[in-house]
Image (cartoon, rainbow, N blue to C red):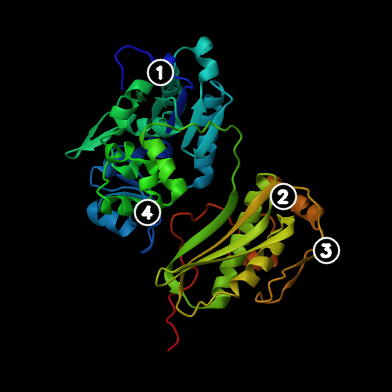
Amino acid sequence: MANVRDRSAELTPAILLVDMDSFFASVEVLDNPALSGKPVLVGGDGKRGVVASANYEARRFGIHSAMPMANALRRCPDAVCVPGNMARYAEVSSQVHEIFASVTPIIEPLALDEAFLDVSGSIRLLGSPLEIGHAIRLRIKQELALDCGIGVASSKQVAKLASRSAKPRIERDRVVPGPGVFVVLDEDVRSYLNPMPVRALFGVGPTTATKLSKLGIETVADLADLDPSMLERHVGGSVAHLIVDLANGRDTRPVEAGVKNRSIGHEETFTHDSYDLADLDQRLIRQAHAVANALRSSGQEGATVTVKIKLANFEQHTRSVTLEEGLDDPQAIYEVASGLLATHDIGGGVRLLGISLSALRPRGGPKQLHLRLDDPTVADPLVTQEDRGALLDALDEIKRRFGKEAVGTANLLSADGVISPGQRDIAFGAKDLTPPKEADD
């Protein structure tokens, strides 16, 4: 496993998984040194806010990401809660990726703080994968004052798990440093994986883990020697074969360079349930602008519009429509999304609302004057979309030169000026736009 003698050059392919340590919280401490040594939580501070990132000082109290913020603050009342700045995190992530690109062009991002690197072609020039991993960590530390954990293996599954072994861990309220880079050789894969819970494997979610537990399968070792056909009727044929392969360390997925977003979206969880269609519609306008801004910034447009709602009872529903044309116009996105929202029953109250666009492609595809939604259940199925590309390009240029709040549409005006929604502005639990409303009797 973590080897005294460096044999990592034997790995074929040689895959690194680089995972930044408590990335969002670490960037906040970097930008505000007064937070150094304090427990820092990034996330929404409303009643329904969640922890997006917690530094190790906060993790000592048992706090982890995705925990409700209210629970986290009960565990650590002295924690400093900051709302987060996704634009800043994306900026630092770009700097981290510049370091990756100096090592290999084969980079597959998983998130702002995590990426696979295939360094097989860099070994003769830069040294063994272990040496490359340490060099990456050193540059990130020296140039960006941030830390990361790096897993090294010949497969993506094992490299990702190894990155966790490389990181600091909490033991008896103490932060114990990790090795920084952790290598798993092919001959050690089974002994490394065997004691892990099956939930550690890619493809084993809570439902599958529960089904396996009922069969007495708790660890990877329990799973590895099974015939997949014995599991097919319990978890499905494809899942059965996948998880048995992974339990044996068999994972031939390559690192895919240049992987783009499959969808771009924005959603908000409300502090208070909303029962008002007009209120939801106003939020939808802002979300449509946020998504359109993200699409245009990435040079993409999307043909499939999806609206998602989560009701007060936690039921989740989605409605989608796929158009022949790709959209990047906020007004067109809003009109389509508004029609989809109208098909939802919101009588029980809505706690979450979101828009996403998928079937992404480069901007500049053919446009029509009209987008017709053929679903007869969609209210107002005729959506007018004049070709406003030149106008939108001009607005983008004004915003680049004079700031995002320099110009906007009338439906984004407020008493304080133009609202300029960003895709990630309130990603971790939205502030309420309206006071709580009670459901009608």
The answer to which quarter of the image holds residue 140 is top left
Give the residue displayed 46% in from the left and 37% down from the top. 113
Q: List the residue tagged with mark 2.
A: 396
Say what secondary structure mark 3 lies in. Answer: loop
Of callouts 2 and 4, the N-terminal one: 4
Q: What mark, if any, has residue 318 been given in the picture?
A: none
Front: mark 2 or 4: 4
Q: Amino acid at mark 2?
A: Asp
Relative height, residue 92 to residue 328 (above, below): above
Q: Position of residue 283 (x, y in %)?
A: 56, 67
Q: Position of residue 380 (x, y in %)?
A: 71, 76
SS under mark 4: helix
In three-dimensional space, the C-alpha distance between marks 1 and 4, rounded to whole angstroms, equals: 40 Å
Q: Quadrant of residue 306?
A: bottom right
Residue 234: mark: 4
Which residue is farthest bottom? 441
Q: Earlier in the sequence, mark 3 or mark 4?
A: 4
Secondary element at image label 1: helix
Give the residue drawn at x 38%, y 56%.
Answer: 50
Between the C-alphas of marks 2 and 1, the distance is: 45 Å
Screen quadrant of the N terminus: top left
Mark 1 vs 3: CB contact within 8 A: no
Determine which of the numbered discs, if any, sits on residue 369 in the image: 3
Q: Which mark is residue 130?
A: 1
Relative horizontal placement of residue 280, taking residue 54 as reference (left or right): right
Residue 326 visible in the current orientation: yes
* Circle nearer the viewer, 3 or 2: 3
- Give the mark toward the camera: 3 or 4: 4
Dot 3 and dot 4 residues touching (CB under 8 Å) = no
The three-letter amino acid code for the residue at tag 3 is Leu
